[in-house]
Image (cartoon, grey):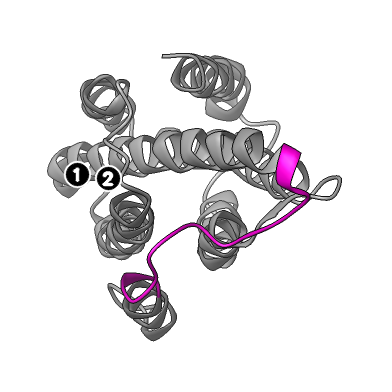
Amino acid sequence: MLKPQLTPLSQAYIKHQSTMQAPMIHNDQHQSQGKTALGDRIMKVNHAGEHGAICIYTAQIFLARLTAPGLVEELIEFRSHERAHRAVFDAELQRRGQAKCRSYHVCGIGGYTLGLLTSLFGTSAISATTVAIESVVLRHLQQQITALSSGNVIDTSAINAIKIIIEEEQLHHDHSARHCKADGFWSRLLGPIVAASTETVIWLGMRL
């Protein structure tokens, strides 16, 4: 069994952040505004991305009962993690006084569509999709941490929110990789397409 929905760490983070009044920024004064704006944007994009992931898993669970029944329990666990991750970013956005990203519903619709299409083809296709998405997501999360901690300005709140989810995102990648071959048909077909789509959604989210 994987970790349950809303892990104690996520619960503790949300509870702690709810008591704080403003983003935790350690900085030189003249740089703080720009770094806070970057942190706000990253929190919005990550929140929308988690919503998209929930929609992907929801659609996959629906059809996987027929096409990949052995994967359903794992997908349900993955979705519970993503719901907890979305809650972390939602709490951070509320504390910062920020609205959802404009790409939020686009991510949801795209997630449902991708989930339905890939789940039609069974375990390998579903797992190859997760591996491709998580490969991109994990790379971006590390880049976000670097950007938010560079120079004399450190957005501690945003960095902590990101670090909270990395372990479980890595778990999704690694568990899914066990169900599909890196050089298999679905990995070779879906990998580049899904990865490019994920990159595009992140790119758009940072600019909408």
* Residue 171 appears left or right of 45: right
Place of residue 25 in the rendered image (x, y in percent of width and height, measured from the top left): 63, 57
The foreground one among 118 and 102 is 102
Residue 4 screen position, x and y as percent: 31, 78
Bounds of the magenta span? 17-30
Q: Which mark is residue 54?
A: 2
Q: Label 2, label 1: how many angstroms apart (C-alpha)?
A: 6 Å
| Mark 2 residue crowding within 10 angstroms, few (<14) / some (14–19) / many (20+) | many
- Residue at (31, 35) in percent of width and height: 52
Q: Amino acid at mark 1?
A: Thr
Q: Is residue 49 placed above or below 5 in the rendered structure? A: above
Q: Which numbered circle lies on residue 58?
A: 1
Asked whether disc 2 touches disc 1, contact meaning CB atoms under 8 Å apart, the reply is: yes
Point out the residue furthest to the right here: 151
* The one of 36 and 47 positioned closer to us in this rendering: 36
Under tag 2, what secondary structure? helix
- Viewer-closest of 190 and 17: 17
Pick out the residue farthest to the front: 29
| Residue that appears at 27% across and 34% down | 100
